[in-house]
Amino acid sequence: MEKIMNEQARKRYFGDFGGRFIPEVLVPAFEELEEAWASVKHDRKFFDELERAQRDFVGRPTPLLLAENLTTSCGGGRIWLKMEALAHTGAHKINNALGQGLLAKKMGKKRLIAETGAGQHGLATAAVAARLGLECEIFMGEVDMARQHPNVYGMRLFGARVTAVTEGSRTLTDAVNAAMKSWTERVSDTHYLIGSALGPYPFPEIVRTFQSVIGKELRSQFRERYAELAGRASRDPSIEMEQGASSGSCILAGVSDAQKSLPDVMVACVGGGSNSIGLFHDFLDDESVRLVGVEAGGHGTAPGEHAVRMTSGQGRPGVVQAYRSIFLQDDNGSLLPTSSVSAGLDYAGIGPELAYYGKNGRIEFTSASDEEVLDAVQVLARTEGILPALESAHALAAAVRLARTLPVGTDIVVNISGRGDKDLFITAPRLDGEDWLDFLKAEVARLEGLL
């Protein structure tokens, strides 16, 4: 804990988690950021500008889709998809990147830096920098660069410099360290655009605020879509409104009241936690809504085989990367290695606000294994014509598992936080096998002939 817990310092915490444990060289930068954030977070003019950009540049609001075929194939609960994958650059990351980009411009900064794992935050930051006329550098682990090359290519097209991080595990945790170190060297003209709801205060609050647009949209969208569903049910007298209805009518089973305003369950994947806290935050006071965060179960339960902080028994409180939260650590406090089929979920820590709500029981946590995730990708593709990101497929796998245990008519919302084509170089070798290998060989031969 910080030594002096005055009222101002207390505001930097979520229960016992959060805070700001920074080197002296960064104190002026954080004081400047905190002052700037305080000046805009209730400024209607700033948020009017943000909302216009969300509409015209990002493409908000993103749709809420009733997954009728998936629901029918699963039986049980009704599954809805919040389609953040349809936002510009293909994921929820653009919400926060745009907000922080506008904040940085207001602060007079000329350069943005960011870390990225799956590449979506890097892509979003690079796009925002191009739009706002700012210099941009993205730090990315060497391992992640290899498995997310399409996003690396996109960042470079937007004009960003992509810097490979070769230390440690060469993944997201190390990219965060490299970005923070770079910031200390150019504080005066640079804003560090953190991509998840973590890090030293005020970053967790800033990121959550900009991502909470997801839940705010969902609240009104669900009410509207449910009323439409109730209208469909009332117009079709042949629908059986009871559990066990036939496949065609199970979508409408239990829909008798057009006034239902809240889903029963909401599910999101959790790496650092920006898409999940963005989905959940507007519903934290609605106790009837069950909130479920899904961590990366990886390929086993031993240390280094997963990235499960909250339910593995291996997550412990500690201060890492300048904030206090739950981290995968050994007895000496060193971070444990992580593993996940998804580049965006293999982070050793979790955002402090999520850690707080997990510990007090408001948000429950579960995990999905690599195998379940790959199955979920194929199921959604074949039932709904949607290719989800591997990160989002964690949430989908858990939601499908949950739906089968819940009564017909229960409403489950899943955040499809990103697009799946970015994962081509991860999923294709596993799911397309020899055909993928043959394609790569043919491409190499073709390119050799051109060069």
Image (cartoon, rainbow, N blue to C red):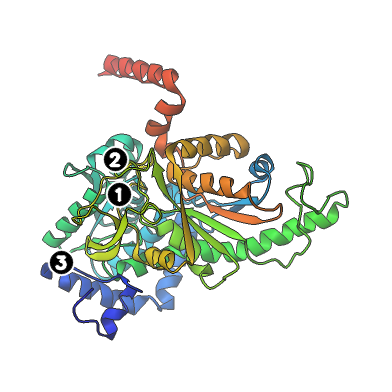
The quarter of the picture where residue 439 lies is: top left
* Mark 3–mark 2 CB contact (< 8 Å): no
Quadrant assignment for the N terminus: bottom left
> What residue sits right under mark 2 in the picture?
144
Query: Which x, y percent locates residue 313?
Result: 36, 54
> What residue sits right under mark 3 in the picture?
188
Query: Which x, y percent locates residue 216?
Result: 53, 66
- Which amino acid type is marked by label 3? Ser
Residue, x 24% and y 68% (percent of image)?
108
**Residue neighbourhood size for the residue with mark 1, other residues' Cα within 10 Å, grouped as few (<14), some (14–19), many (≥20):** many
| Comparing labels 3 and 2, the label whose residue is closer to the camera | 2
Residue, x 18% and y 52% (percent of image)?
178
Closer to the chain start, of discs 3 and 1, is 1
Q: Can residue 137 be seen in the rendering of this structure?
A: no
Residue, x 79% and y 46% (percent of image)?
245
Closer to the chain start, of discs 3 and 2, is 2
Q: Using the image as rendered, state which of residue 153 and residue 218 is in the foreground.
A: 218
Q: Using the image as rendered, state which of residue 125 and residue 309 is in the foreground.
A: 309
Query: Which x, y percent locates residue 160?
Result: 26, 47
Q: Using the image as rendered, state which of residue 65 and residue 54 is in the foreground.
A: 65
| Comparing labels 3 and 1, the label whose residue is closer to the camera | 1
Query: Which x, y percent locates residue 282?
Result: 51, 69
Q: CA distance from mark 3 to mark 2?
A: 29 Å
> What residue sits right under mark 1 in the picture?
116
* Mark 3–mark 1 CB contact (< 8 Å): no
* Mark 2–mark 1 CB contact (< 8 Å): yes
**Residue neighbourhood size for the residue with mark 3, other residues' Cα within 10 Å, grouped as few (<14), some (14–19), many (≥20):** some
- Which amino acid type is marked by label 1? Thr
